[in-house]
Image (tube, helix red, strand yellow):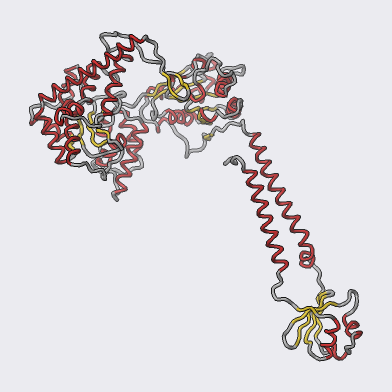
Amino acid sequence: MSSPEIQNKKKVIIKRTNNDGKEPKDGSIVSYIVSTILIFIVLSTLYSFISNSSGTKIEQIPISQLSSDIKSGLVKTITVKGDSLDVEYKTGETKNSKKEEGEALLQTLVNYGATKDQIASIKIDIKNDTGFTYWLINLSPIIFPILFIAIFIWFLTRQVKGAGMQALTFGQSKARMIDPNDKSQRVTFKDVAGAKEAKEELSEIVDFLRNPKKFLDIGARIPKGILLMGAPGTGKTLLARAVAGEAGVAFFSISGSEFVEMFVGVGASRVRDLFLMAKKNSPAIIFVDEIDAVGRVRGAGLGGGNDEREQTLNQILVEMDGFEPNEKVIVMAATNRPDVLDPALLRPGRFDRRVTLDLPDRKDREEILQVHSTKKPFAEDVNLKVIAERTPGFSGADLYSLMNEGAILAARENRLKVSQYDLIRSIEKVMLGPERKSHILSKKEKEITAYHEAGHAVLASILPYADPVHKISIIARGRAAGYVLHLPIEDTKLQSKKEFLDDIAVSLGGYVTEKMMFDDVTTGPSNDLQVSTALARDMVTKYGMSDMLGPVALEGTGGKALFGRGVEEKEFSEKVGSDIDAEVSRIMLEARQKAEKYITENRKLLDAIAKRLMEVETIERAEFETILVANGITPKKKLDIEHQA
């Protein structure tokens, strides 16, 4: 039951607010050192455990006992491994013995009393420990610790080298390059619907990049900088890519915030590197998105003159129009805040051509919807012209979201085609948010909400300069417990004082109705009051629509930041400020009196709308107009608006 701010007649919704390539991180080298040491300790412990564990304990016997066992006929096999003797007995038992170093086994046993015939009856197997395995086993206690230390040192130096390389590349540009031969990322003017004037303005840039000699021979210089200005979502980035795609040149894109770092001079270094890259790949286009991040008006030097953002801006100014002429590199930038840019950026020789992208009109919206519907299967009832008529003030990004939400709704309901009903529902979803089906109003709340929305609808239908109602609903959606959607019949660029006054009265319809019907006021009209009061103050301070103060602009210039908070600059005296407050109060009081008058006179219509809302919860335009006719009210048509104008 409250209404969002009115900007370029985007949408007037009366709603009831409900009160509901990675860089290593810091300390990575230390963590790698600690982890390597831990791994080294674990592996060393494991190796020691394995080398010391011998499974079954083998009994060691002296050579004299071995000789006695041979004389007794107990020995079956003797395996000679150097000076070590593995003795296998006829009982299956295995024992180990040692002979003297350098002495032959036969002679040693004979010396201990065994005869040659007794020795000959025993199988003697001699194995020489030589080769790679022998040396590996013997040298492993030395090799493995050295190997672990070498791996540790290599791992450590690798990390240090990586940190050093990052330090060396810290000042390099992070711009992303789109190759003109990459057809998968190529965008042309055919992919950009609407914005006819902007495309005509930029076609000269395309012609220059294709054939610069034609301009240079006649002494003409193409603008070095093109500033794209417009509301968010109007297609500034897409249009810049289309210029590069049409011209078939390299496209370097970067955000203004990517220049700025905590170290002074890094941003300027990245600017130099970016322009150097573009010159090597010329002809080329450099696109800086959100340039207001670095291009804001420079300060007066308070707090020091080496501010990082100012250093970056100064370097951009020099690169665009400095000592080195730059004929084949064009800089394009986008911003939705051209008012905060430094004047040096906007002077001739830098961003001397400014292209404004407005919100699309009805025809442009239909073309944009066609572009976004190329890969979506539509049902037979889809009419994009109707969708375009019901979305005044939608940007290109809003329309893309609308089409995407329509496809999601169809897929969620397991349908293979997108219907008109899906697109109609997606309009409200983009504007207000999803339906909150779990939010069930009590009987009393439902009645209050129904009368609240009916109050808005009655005033929107009676007041001559208010927009006609398209839909009324008391189904919770987003943060709204109910809403009235009323849209202009035609797109307009200008709004009059009479339209503003009627809009304020419509916004107060819910407040007045609640007070009249229930002798009380809820929190529902809170947003209504905020929006209508802000509009009344703009009428007085911004648009010069006050008879008492006259045609004087009294609004601030945006204010300054102090301790992280905005401080509005007031360029008027305390008396004028008091007069502004008095005028705002007068406008709000007169709007309230107007709302009370018309709602009282049309009480029967108010009850009929509220009763129907409590029954069906949603009233579409056709049914609403039937209720109006039944109560003696003629619905607004296009001819009626033209006649009033």
Place residue 271 in its image quadrant: top right
Q: Is residue 437 above or below residue 466?
A: below
Residue 104 versus residue 350: which sits nearer the camera? Answer: 104
In percent of width and height, residue 590 lies at 20, 17
**In the foreground, 460 or 251:** 460
Residue 98 x %, y %? 84, 77
**Residue at (35% x, 12% y) in the render:** 554
Q: Going by the image, does 447 lie left or right of 127? A: left
The residue depicted at 16 percent of the width and 18 percent of the height is 643
Please provide percent x and percent y for residue 205: 48, 23
Give the quadrant of residue 134: bottom right
List x then y, in percent, for residue 263.
60, 28
Q: Is residue 208 visible?
A: yes
Q: Is residue 48 above or below residue 104?
A: above
Q: Is residue 27 left or right of residue 422?
A: right
Q: Using the rendered view, name the quadrant where residue 610 is placed.
A: top left
* Left-right relation of 446 to 7: left
Depth check, front residue: 28 or 136: 28
Query: Vertical placement of 189 versus 226: above or below?
Result: below
From this viewpoint, is residue 320 visible?
Answer: no
Most extreme residue toward the front, as rendered? Answer: 520
Query: Is 376 displayed left or right of 187 in the figure?
Result: left
